[in-house]
Amino acid sequence: MFPASAPGVIEQAGGRLRKEFEKRVGRAAPQSAEPAKPELLTTASIVNAFQPAHLVTPPASPTLVGEKNTAYVEALRQTTGFPPGHGAV
């Protein structure tokens, strides 16, 4: 077993080390508080995440895929494994 140390031995050694450090290097800078973390949800971040639709299919259109969104739908088909020109859409 280790011998029991006298109370305050560690604190005394730490105090001596601090004094020696301050004598050689100078006073230690005070610890600053943790830097402020940016807010995760702000009005600006929500507005950026939920932009309104820029292009929709006209209400009277007989199909959902038109000339303006064909490239988008084809790209979606490629991500799902459907061959071009086929699929549920």
Image: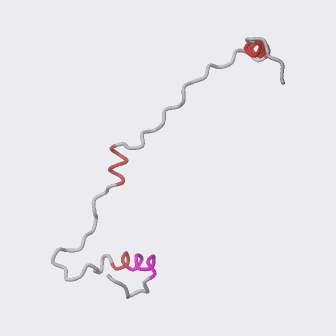
Range drawn in magenta: 74-81
Residue situated in front as seen by the camera: 19 or 27: 19
Quadrant housing the C terminus: bottom left
Q: Is residue 78 above or below residue 47?
A: below
Instruction: Confirm whether the magenta stretch covers residue 56.
Output: no
Query: Left or right of 31: which side holds 82?
Result: left
Query: Left or right of 81: which side holds 60?
Result: left
Q: Main secondary structure of the magenta part?
A: helix
Q: Residue at x 31, y 57 (%)?
A: 51
Residue 18 image point, x, y percent? 74, 15
Residue 59 image point, x, y percent? 17, 74
In the rendered image, which quarter is residue 22 located in?
Answer: top right
Quadrant housing the N terminus: top right
Marks counted in the figure total 0
Task: Tell me which colouring the rendered structure shows.
Answer: secondary structure
Q: Is residue 57 above or below residue 29?
A: below
Residue at the outermost left position:
60
Q: Residue at x 28, y 59 (%)?
A: 52
Q: Residue at x 36, y 77 (%)?
A: 73
Instruction: Confirm whether the magenta stretch covers residue 79.
Output: yes
Q: Is residue 70 above or below residue 30?
A: below
Q: Residue at x 57, y 24 (%)?
A: 32
Q: Is residue 40 above or below residue 82?
A: above
Residue 15 image point, x, y percent? 74, 12
Residue situated in front as seen by the camera: 6 or 36: 6
Residue at the outermost front position:
1
